[in-house]
Image (tube, grey):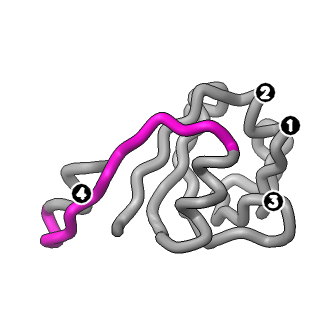
Amino acid sequence: MLNAFRHYGLNPVQEWVNFDQAYSIMEKYTGTINPKGMYHFMACRGVSGDLLWVANSAPGYMGVGDYLSRSQFNSLGPVSLIYLP
């Protein structure tokens, strides 16, 4: 994923994050989120209330639709976030 962003001249940052860190980053930036318990990349759309808003190409997979709650996040972690500052 990092190389795909770099191919288009972007400078991605990858971090292993907890829910609060992901929330803070997703308030400002787009990118991808990959909970290792899902083994599935989703695009970061932003936040909504106390949820992470994601673009899930497989809605319902592992119980995740368009939003990722703190409890889902914690149960599917660790979580890698690649974002574009």
Q: Residues within 10 Å of mark 4 (few under 14, many from 20)?
A: few
Residue bearing the label numbered 2:
75
Q: Secondary structure at mark 4?
A: helix
> Are discs 1 and 2 less than 8 Å apart at CB?
yes
The CA span between labels 1 and 4 is: 30 Å
Magenta span = 7-19
Specify which label sits upstream in the sequence, 4 or 2.
Answer: 4
The CA span between labels 3 and 2 is: 15 Å
The CA span between labels 1 and 2 is: 6 Å
Q: Hey, what amino acid is under mark 2?
A: Ser
- As for residue 12 lying within the magenta part, the answer is yes
Q: Judge whether 66 appears above or below 18 on screen.
A: below
> Are discs 3 and 4 less than 8 Å apart at CB?
no
The total number of labels drawn is: 4
Q: Secondary structure at mark 1?
A: helix
Residue bearing the label numbered 1:
71
Residue 14: image x %, image y %? 35, 45
Q: Residues within 10 Å of mark 2 (few under 14, many from 20)?
A: few
The CA span between labels 3 and 4 is: 27 Å
Residue bearing the label numbered 4:
4
Q: Residues within 10 Å of mark 1 (few under 14, many from 20)?
A: few
Residue 28: image x %, image y %? 53, 73
Q: Which mark is residue 51?
A: 3
- Pair 1/4: label in front: 1
- Pair 3/4: label in front: 3
The CA span between labels 3 and 1 is: 10 Å
Q: Residue at x 86, y 37 (%)?
A: 71
Q: Judge whether 79 appears above or below 48 on screen.
A: above
> Are discs 1 and 4 less than 8 Å apart at CB?
no
Q: Hey, what amino acid is under mark 3?
A: Leu
- Whether residue 84 sits left or right of residue 79 in the image: it is left
- Whether residue 27 sits left or right of residue 10 in the image: it is right
